[in-house]
Image: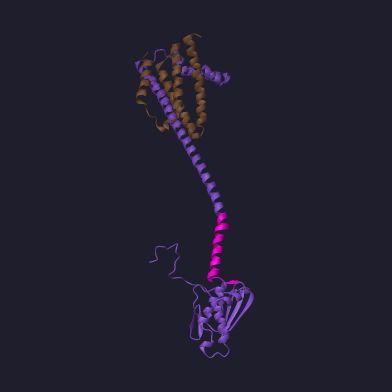
């Protein structure tokens, strides 16, 4: 329950502050969001599986975001930023779909 | 607790699995971080209050992140739409201005053609013709055509001014010729203009300020058939015949089919100005 409160607090904070993203950070924001989504859905599935662990969640979240941003950064430097982004999105997308499917099975038992 | 060797073995198994399954199947099968399962299996008791707070903060950060990305995207979408609209407006405006310029260019080209044609044919040609006619009329250009040759000379063995051709005699002769229809006259190579004086200077007669000696040979352009008779009909012509008869001055008029009269020298006007240019300056 406290996790939901955290989520709500974050959303409200974002609504109130409307933070301006610096220009150099802008390209990494969408991929970071997708990576974060992956971590969150993974955590939700783990929670429903009964094996959720706070430490693992924090670490997976941070590492997902950082690695995704890093991949895009390196890709930009190499001139293949768009292609690498696509690759990352595909992998994370597959993972998100699988996790959401598992969550769905938990909730609807179907 | 599992030993590092256990973990290595586990990872090696995963590796094997990945190779046999293919990437997509592996990704689907391992969508959730294995660490959850591993930790639960091996360290069920980890994670205390601090970890719980960290997880909450992480989720808050996630919310913030999602919202920031969303606002950023919508904001830049608005900007992009604005820019797009502005660009479209610019394109339309530029296209219109281009169209009007093309129209202008076409119109100017047409005008140019018309003007060139007009300048080439009518206007400049008419102007040139007028200049030529005026130059002919004023004696500023050489003239040639049909006419008569008039030779006036002193009486033979003249010993008094009475028996010589004087300036007034020459003036009468010229006047009579003008009256008879002469269009251009030269006396001993001096073309008569509207400014040419004929006056005595000692024994010579000055025409255009050039002293001339007898015989005075006048080239007269005009109708060669009618000039002599009309000359005889004028008062001054009749006077000349009297002079010829009574004093012995000699006068001969012969028809000529081709006469060439020289142009008068350049004359400068210092006071006369075109009326159209200085209408108010005549004080």
Q: What residue is at 52 percent from the left and 23 percent from the top? A: A90
Colour of chain A in the image: brown
Q: Where is residue B79 in the image (x, y as percent from the top left)?
A: 43, 31
Q: In the rendering, at what x and y percent does residue B189 appear?
A: 56, 78
Give left or right: position of B247 versus B48.
Answer: right
B191 lies above or below B5: below
- Name chain B's colour: purple
Q: Which residue lies furthest to the top in this view?
A: A109
Q: In this view, does A46 lie above or below A71?
A: above
B125 falls in the magenta region: yes
Q: How is the image coloured?
A: by chain
- Front-lying residue, B154 or A14: B154
B165 displayed left or right of B42: right
**Quadrant (top left, top right, bottom left, bottom right) of the C terminus of chain B:** bottom left
Q: In which quarter of the image is the N terminus of chain B?
A: top left
Report whether residue A67 is seen. no
Is A72 drawn above or below residue B199 in the view shown? above
Q: What stretch is highlighted in magenta?
A: B116-145
Could you tell me residue B102's position as x and y percent?
A: 53, 44
Q: In this view, does A58 lie to the left or right of A88?
A: left
Q: Residue at x 39, y 32 (%)?
A: A22
Could you tell me what secondary structure mostly forms the magenta stretch?
helix
Of residue B255 and residue B115, the one placed in the foreground of this image is B255
């Amino acid at each position: 329950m406290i996790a939901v409160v955290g989520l709500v607090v974050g959303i409200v904070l974002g609504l109130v502050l409307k933070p301006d993203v610096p220009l150099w950070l802008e390209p990494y924001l969408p991929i970071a969001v997708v990576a974060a989504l992956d971590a969150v859905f993974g955590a939700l599935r783990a929670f429903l599986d009964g094996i959720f662990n706070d430490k693992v969640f924090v670490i997976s979240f941070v590492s997902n975001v950082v690695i995704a941003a890093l991949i895009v950064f390196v890709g930009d430097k190499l001139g293949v930023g768009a292609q690498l982004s696509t690759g990352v999105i595909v992998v994370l997308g597959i993972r998100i779909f699988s996790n959401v499917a598992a969550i769905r099975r938990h909730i609807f038992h179907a | 607790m599992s030993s590092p060797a256990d973990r290595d073995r586990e990872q090696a198994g995963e590796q094997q699995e990945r190779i046999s399954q293919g990437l997509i199947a592996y990704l689907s099968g391992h969508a959730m971080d294995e660490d959850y399962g591993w930790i639960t299996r091996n360290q069920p008791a980890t994670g205390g209050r601090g970890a719980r707070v960290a997880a909450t903060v992480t989720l808050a950060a996630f919310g913030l992140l999602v919202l920031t990305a969303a606002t950023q995207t919508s904001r830049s979408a608005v900007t992009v739409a604005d820019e797009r609209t502005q660009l479209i407006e610019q394109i339309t405006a530029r296209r219109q201005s281009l169209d009007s310029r093309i129209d202008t260019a076409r119109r100017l080209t047409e005008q140019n053609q018309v003007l060139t044609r007009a300048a080439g044919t009518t206007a400049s040609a008419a102007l040139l013709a007028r200049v030529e006619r005026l130059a002919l009329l004023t004696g500023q250009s050489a003239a040639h055509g049909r006419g008569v040759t008039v030779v006036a000379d002193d009486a033979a063995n003249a010993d008094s001014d009475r028996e010589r051709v004087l300036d007034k005699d020459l003036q009468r002769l010229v006047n009579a010729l003008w009256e008879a229809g002469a269009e251009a006259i030269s006396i001993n190579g001096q073309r008569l203009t509207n400014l040419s004086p004929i006056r005595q200077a000692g024994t010579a007669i000055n025409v255009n300020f050039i002293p001339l000696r007898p015989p005075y040979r006048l080239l007269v352009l005009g109708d060669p058939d009618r000039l002599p008779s009309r000359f005889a009909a004028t008062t001054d012509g009749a006077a000349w015949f009297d002079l010829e008869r009574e004093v012995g001055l000699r006068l001969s008029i012969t028809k000529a089919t081709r006469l060439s009269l020289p142009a008068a020298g350049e004359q400068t006007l210092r006071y006369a100005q075109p009326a159209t240019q200085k209408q108010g300056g005549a004080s």
